[in-house]
Protein backbone atom coordinates (compact mmCIF):
# COMPACT_ATOMS: atom_id res chain seq x y z
CA UNK A 1 0.00 0.00 0.00
CA UNK A 2 2.80 2.42 -0.79
CA UNK A 3 0.94 4.41 -3.43
CA UNK A 4 -1.78 6.05 -1.30
CA UNK A 5 0.87 7.32 1.13
CA UNK A 6 2.82 8.95 -1.71
CA UNK A 7 -0.38 10.48 -2.97
CA UNK A 8 -0.95 11.94 0.49
CA UNK A 9 2.53 13.39 0.62
CA UNK A 10 2.14 14.82 -2.86
CA UNK A 11 -1.22 16.37 -1.99
CA UNK A 12 0.23 17.99 1.13
CA UNK A 13 3.16 19.26 -0.90
CA UNK A 14 0.80 20.84 -3.44
CA UNK A 15 -1.23 22.44 -0.67
CA UNK A 16 1.84 23.92 1.00
CA UNK A 17 3.17 25.19 -2.35
CA UNK A 18 -0.20 26.78 -3.08
CA UNK A 19 -0.30 28.49 0.34
CA UNK A 20 3.25 29.80 0.01
CA UNK A 21 2.59 31.15 -3.49
CA UNK A 22 -0.69 32.79 -2.38
CA UNK A 23 1.01 34.44 0.56
CA UNK A 24 3.85 35.63 -1.65
CA UNK A 25 1.63 37.16 -4.31
CA UNK A 26 -0.54 38.88 -1.69
CA UNK A 27 2.59 40.27 -0.06
CA UNK A 28 3.92 41.50 -3.42
CA UNK A 29 0.57 43.14 -4.21
CA UNK A 30 0.56 45.00 -0.88
CA UNK A 31 4.15 46.06 -1.43
CA UNK A 32 3.52 47.46 -4.90
CA UNK A 33 0.40 49.31 -3.67
CA UNK A 34 2.42 50.87 -0.84
CA UNK A 35 5.11 51.93 -3.34
CA UNK A 36 2.49 53.51 -5.57
CA UNK A 37 0.96 55.42 -2.65
CA UNK A 38 4.47 56.44 -1.56
CA UNK A 39 5.14 57.93 -4.99
CA UNK A 40 2.01 60.06 -4.61
CA UNK A 41 3.20 61.19 -1.16
CA UNK A 42 6.55 62.13 -2.72
CA UNK A 43 4.94 64.07 -5.56
CA UNK A 44 2.47 65.92 -3.32
CA UNK A 45 4.96 67.29 -0.79
CA UNK A 46 7.89 69.69 -1.08
CA UNK A 47 10.38 66.92 -2.02
CA UNK A 48 10.66 68.02 -5.66
CA UNK A 49 11.66 71.56 -4.59
CA UNK A 50 15.10 70.06 -4.01
CA UNK A 51 14.99 66.59 -5.62
CA UNK A 52 14.21 65.19 -9.09
CA UNK A 53 10.56 64.52 -9.99
CA UNK A 54 9.24 60.95 -9.72
CA UNK A 55 9.20 60.26 -13.49
CA UNK A 56 12.91 61.10 -13.74
CA UNK A 57 13.66 58.87 -10.75
CA UNK A 58 11.68 56.08 -12.46
CA UNK A 59 13.76 56.53 -15.61
CA UNK A 60 16.99 56.29 -13.61
CA UNK A 61 15.75 53.10 -11.97
CA UNK A 62 15.01 51.64 -15.41
CA UNK A 63 18.64 52.33 -16.29
CA UNK A 64 19.67 50.73 -12.96
CA UNK A 65 21.26 54.01 -11.79
CA UNK A 66 21.38 55.16 -8.20
CA UNK A 67 19.34 58.32 -7.73
CA UNK A 68 17.77 59.79 -4.62
CA UNK A 69 18.68 57.11 -2.08
CA UNK A 70 22.43 56.62 -1.98
CA UNK A 71 23.61 56.43 1.60
CA UNK A 72 20.79 55.25 3.86
CA UNK A 73 19.43 52.11 2.23
CA UNK A 74 17.74 50.57 5.28
CA UNK A 75 14.22 51.63 6.33
CA UNK A 76 15.28 52.49 9.89
CA UNK A 77 18.24 54.61 8.80
CA UNK A 78 16.18 56.45 6.17
CA UNK A 79 13.37 57.08 8.62
CA UNK A 80 15.79 58.32 11.26
CA UNK A 81 17.43 60.70 8.77
CA UNK A 82 14.21 62.17 7.37
CA UNK A 83 12.63 62.51 10.81
CA UNK A 84 15.57 64.45 12.26
CA UNK A 85 17.05 66.45 9.35
CA UNK A 86 15.91 70.08 9.34
CA UNK A 87 15.40 70.24 5.55
CA UNK A 88 12.98 67.34 5.80
CA UNK A 89 10.50 68.83 8.19
CA UNK A 90 7.54 67.97 5.95
CA UNK A 91 8.33 64.29 6.61
CA UNK A 92 7.83 64.78 10.33
CA UNK A 93 4.47 66.43 9.71
CA UNK A 94 3.06 63.52 7.66
CA UNK A 95 0.81 60.89 9.13
CA UNK A 96 2.54 57.64 9.93
CA UNK A 97 0.99 55.68 7.05
CA UNK A 98 2.28 58.25 4.54
CA UNK A 99 5.74 58.07 6.11
CA UNK A 100 5.79 54.26 5.78
CA UNK A 101 4.56 54.32 2.17
CA UNK A 102 7.10 57.02 1.29
CA UNK A 103 9.96 54.98 2.77
CA UNK A 104 8.85 51.92 0.76
CA UNK A 105 8.78 54.06 -2.38
CA UNK A 106 12.20 55.59 -1.72
CA UNK A 107 13.78 52.18 -1.11
CA UNK A 108 12.20 50.83 -4.31
CA UNK A 109 14.35 53.40 -6.17
CA UNK A 110 17.55 51.59 -5.23
CA UNK A 111 18.46 49.36 -8.20
CA UNK A 112 18.66 45.66 -7.33
C1 LIG B 1 15.22 72.08 1.18
C2 LIG B 1 15.62 71.07 0.24
C3 LIG B 1 15.11 69.66 0.47
C4 LIG B 1 13.80 69.24 0.55
C5 LIG B 1 12.54 70.09 0.49
C6 LIG B 1 13.85 67.80 0.65
N1 LIG B 1 15.13 67.36 0.66
FE1 LIG B 1 15.76 65.45 0.74
N2 LIG B 1 17.70 66.07 0.81
C7 LIG B 1 18.12 67.37 0.71
C8 LIG B 1 19.59 67.39 0.80
C9 LIG B 1 20.46 68.63 0.74
C10 LIG B 1 20.00 66.05 0.96
C11 LIG B 1 21.42 65.50 1.14
C12 LIG B 1 21.70 65.52 2.61
C13 LIG B 1 22.61 64.45 3.09
O1 LIG B 1 22.78 63.39 2.45
O2 LIG B 1 23.16 64.65 4.18
C14 LIG B 1 18.80 65.25 0.94
C15 LIG B 1 18.78 63.89 1.02
C16 LIG B 1 17.67 63.11 0.85
C17 LIG B 1 17.70 61.68 0.75
C18 LIG B 1 18.96 60.85 0.65
C19 LIG B 1 19.16 59.87 1.75
C20 LIG B 1 20.35 59.02 1.52
O3 LIG B 1 20.75 58.42 2.49
O4 LIG B 1 20.90 58.88 0.43
C21 LIG B 1 16.41 61.27 0.61
C22 LIG B 1 15.90 59.85 0.44
C23 LIG B 1 15.59 62.44 0.63
N3 LIG B 1 16.37 63.53 0.78
C24 LIG B 1 14.22 62.41 0.49
C25 LIG B 1 13.41 63.54 0.56
C26 LIG B 1 11.99 63.50 0.58
C27 LIG B 1 11.15 62.23 0.53
C28 LIG B 1 11.55 64.80 0.66
C29 LIG B 1 10.12 65.28 0.77
C30 LIG B 1 9.38 64.80 1.92
C31 LIG B 1 12.73 65.64 0.67
N4 LIG B 1 13.84 64.84 0.60
C32 LIG B 1 12.71 67.00 0.72
C33 LIG B 1 17.33 68.48 0.54
C34 LIG B 1 15.94 68.47 0.56
Image (cartoon, grey):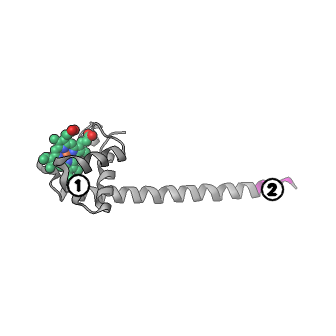
Q: Position of residue 24 (x, y in %)?
A: 50, 55
Visible residue check, residue 82: yes
Extreme-right residue of the structure: 1
**Quadrant holding the C terminus:** top left
Within the magenta stretch, is there residue 4? Answer: yes
Q: Residue at x 33, y 41 (%)?
A: 73
Q: Secondary structure at mark 1?
A: helix
Pick whichever, 22 or 46, lies toward us. Answer: 46
Give the residue pinned by disc 2.
5
Q: Residues under labels 1 and 2: Cα distance?
A: 58 Å
| Disc 1 residue lies near ligand 1 with CB under 8 A | yes
**Could you tell me if residue 52 is visible in this image?**
no
The answer to which of 92 and 9 lies nearer the viewer is 92
Residue 17 image offset from top left, x and y in percent: 61, 54
Residue at 82% x, 54% y: name it.
3
Place residue 11 in its image quadrant: bottom right
In the rendered structure, the answer to whether residue 13 lies left or right of residue 7 reads left
- On screen, residue 14 versus residue 40, left or right, reads right
Q: Quadrant of ligand 1?
A: top left
Which region of the structure is painted magenta?
2-7
- Nearest-to-viewer mark from 1 and 2: 1
Q: Disc 1 designates what residue?
A: 91
Would you say the magenta stretch is mainly helix, strand or loop?
Answer: helix
| Residue 38 painted magenta | no
Q: Is residue 73 left or right of residue 41?
A: right
User: First in sequence: mark 1 or mark 2?
Assistant: 2
In the image, is residue 20 above or below residue 66? below
Observer-nearest of 30 and 85: 85
> Could you tell me which residue is drawn at 17 percent across and 57 percent down?
45
Amino acid sequence: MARPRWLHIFAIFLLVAFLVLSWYSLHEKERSEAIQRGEEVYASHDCTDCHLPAHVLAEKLRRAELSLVRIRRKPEALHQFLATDQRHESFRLMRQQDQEDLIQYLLSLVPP
